[in-house]
Amino acid sequence: MPKSQLECYAESVYCTTSNFLSRINSGKTALDRFISVVAWSISTTRPLRFGVAPYNPTLGETHHVSKGNLNVLLEQVSHHPPVSALHATDDKENIEMTWCHFPVSKFYGTSIETKVHGKRQLKLHNHGETYEMNSPSLVIKILPIPRTDWVGNVGVKCLETGLVAELSYISQSFFGFGAGQRLVKGKIFDSLSMKILYKIEGHWDSYLT
């Protein structure tokens, strides 16, 4: 059954293999929580199938999902341009999320790239921390081998602590083979001292180190 784009956005919040939100809130230090936020942000990247696209929501269309203590509400707040808004709360963990997405597509002959404008915000009310992040771009390759890929730079920052993560989603090789599939690299650093605290490398759909 075809899905709405709103459903796909919602799934990226609640369809995770582990309880990232609980892990975020239970972090003993600001750095522990930040690492968990970065892991959660990467986990919201969903693999897509070539040729299977969600339908565009109509203006005013809504989608609501409840899973455990997590309540997710989305609404299509604009049709031209297509802007989707998300608000989610976890009452048990006292966590709040707000997203605003505005995709813009461009055709390059053998591929289509969709930049996802807007930002995501995650608030940990128990710790008084606010995290902001953006989204990678979606590339649909038509030639030589049809496929989809997430590419581009993603930043995650905590407004109160100054911790920052810079992530790079790296495109596959021209023919789509090799070990570089779904690769993400990056670093976590303190923006006040510019000291690098951790380096990140791995595959966004499987494991990271």
Image (tube, rainbow, N blue to C red):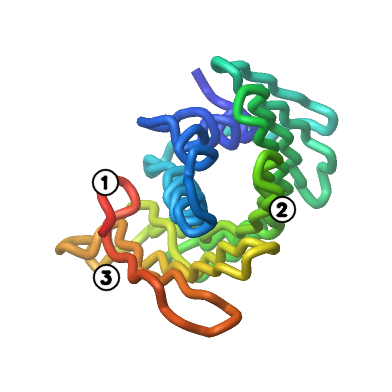
- Of the numbered discs 2 and 1, the one sitting upstream in the chain is 2
Spot the residue most to the left. Answer: 178
Asked if residue 161 can be seen in this view, the reply is yes
| Residue appearing at x 59%, y 37% in the figure | 9
Point out residue 107 in the picture as x, y percentages from the top left corner: 55, 65
Above or below: residue 81 compared with residue 194 = above
Point out residue 78 in the picture as x, y percentages from the top left corner: 84, 43
Q: Name the residue under label 1.
A: 206
Could you say which is closer to the camera, residue 100 or residue 139? 100
| Residue appearing at x 26%, y 46% in the figure | 206
Q: Name the residue under label 2.
A: 102
Above or below: residue 126 compared with residue 131 = above
Task: Name the element at disc 2.
Answer: strand
Task: Name the element at disc 3.
Answer: loop
Which three-letter amino acid code belongs to the residue tagged 1? Ser
Pair 3/1: label in front? 1
Q: Mark 3 points at which residue?
A: 174
Above or below: residue 203 compared with residue 201 = above
Which three-letter amino acid code belongs to the residue tagged 3? Phe
Which three-letter amino acid code belongs to the residue tagged 2? Phe
